[in-house]
Image (spheres, grey):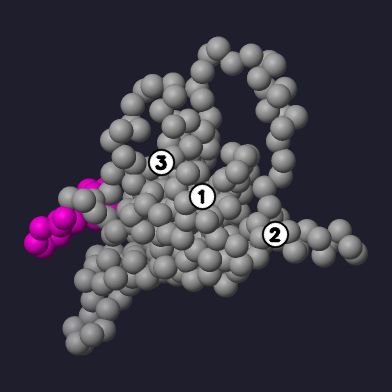
Amino acid sequence: MPEFVDMNTHKTILLVAACWLLAGCASTRSISNSGYRESDTGSCPERVGHDDPAFAYRGELSEFDVLGVRQDPAILDEDIQQALNAAKPVRLKSQSAILLIQSGAIFPDNPIVDELSQHFRVVPFSGVMCREFSSNDADANLNLSKSLRLAAARAGAETILCFWGILESAQEKIATKSVSWVPIVTWFVPDEREHMRIRLKLALIDVRTGNWSVLSPAPFDSKALSVGPRRAVADQKLVERLKTQAYKVSVRELMRVYSEETISANSAK
């Protein structure tokens, strides 16, 4: 019996050691604030020079703000019934104008603008929260939603597309961690494997009615090997690759679910 216990203890120690060896650091970041973070600090590295504070990341827009959902305890069942009776599905018309908002970013990412531009006239709009709307007033979120709809109407856009995204990543330490290079110029041994996943959520708002719909495509994941001196470069390449793939599939899914032409063609079959 003692020998059996010792053997199990030995296996447990080996398992714990293996887990510790492979353990990495997990992190979550917005697609609008996707710069490389050192795994041991969880923060962005300091930048050289002085950034304009007007372009600094200031957090995400709330779905309640964008969709005009009032957090009001006085809502009655009758209000819910009226909203349900008045609700109509959101539809996208090919070559129509769309007001595009990336939550947390002053400019939407170029890859999604390029993908949408194949089907619509894209009007980029800021996704940075204004101080006037960052209050706890029950009507603040409704006011912001109406302001966005008015801005879209003045641009001739029938639909608002606002999207959010998060990047979830984890660094897996490789057994060669202690030997990150060999004594031959430009020869490096990878010492870390980064696993990354991107998740997007897209909200469509009909400018005329305020009706809305939300789509969340399946997440994309990928991984890459990296070494210390080039880790930030590998990280950002992985971020950009995942973004591009996710945007392409998301726009394709938007067209499949909400495009009037696609829905009409499927109905005719």
For label 1, the crowd category at 10 Å Cα-Cα, with few meaning under 14, some 14 to 19 and many 20 or more, is some
Q: Which residue is mark 3?
A: 61
Which numbered disc, 1 or 3, marks the residue closer to the eye?
Answer: 1
Q: Which mark is residue 204?
A: none
For label 3, the crowd category at 10 Å Cα-Cα, with few meaning under 14, some 14 to 19 and many 20 or more, is many
Left or right of 204? Residue 150 is: left
> In this view, which residue lies farthest toward the bottom?
185
Q: Earlier in the sequence, mark 1 or mark 2?
A: 1
- Which kind of residue does numbered mark 1 sit on? Ala
Q: Secondary structure at mark 3?
A: loop
Q: Position of residue 157 (x, y in %)?
A: 54, 55
Q: Which residue is mark 2?
A: 259
> In this view, which residue lies farthest toward the left?
49
Which numbered disc, 1 or 2, marks the residue closer to the eye?
Answer: 1
Residue shown at 53%/37% (left/top)?
67
Mark 3–mark 2 Cα distance, whole angstroms, equals 26 Å
Q: Earlier in the sequence, mark 3 or mark 2?
A: 3
Q: Secondary structure at mark 1?
A: helix
Residue shown at 28%/44% (left/top)?
58
Q: Secondary structure at mark 2?
A: loop
Magenta part mainly helix, strand or loop? loop
Q: Which residue is mark 1?
A: 153
Left or right of 66? Residue 218 is: right
Q: Position of residue 217 (x, y in %)?
A: 60, 54
For label 2, the crowd category at 10 Å Cα-Cα, with few meaning under 14, some 14 to 19 and many 20 or more, is some
Please report the bounds of the magenta region as a residue range: 38-52
Q: Position of residue 180 (x, y in %)?
A: 25, 71
Mark 1–mark 3 Cα distance, whole angstroms, equals 20 Å
Q: Earlier in the sequence, mark 1 or mark 3?
A: 3
- Which kind of residue does numbered mark 2 sit on? Ser
Q: Report whether residue 21 is seen.
A: no
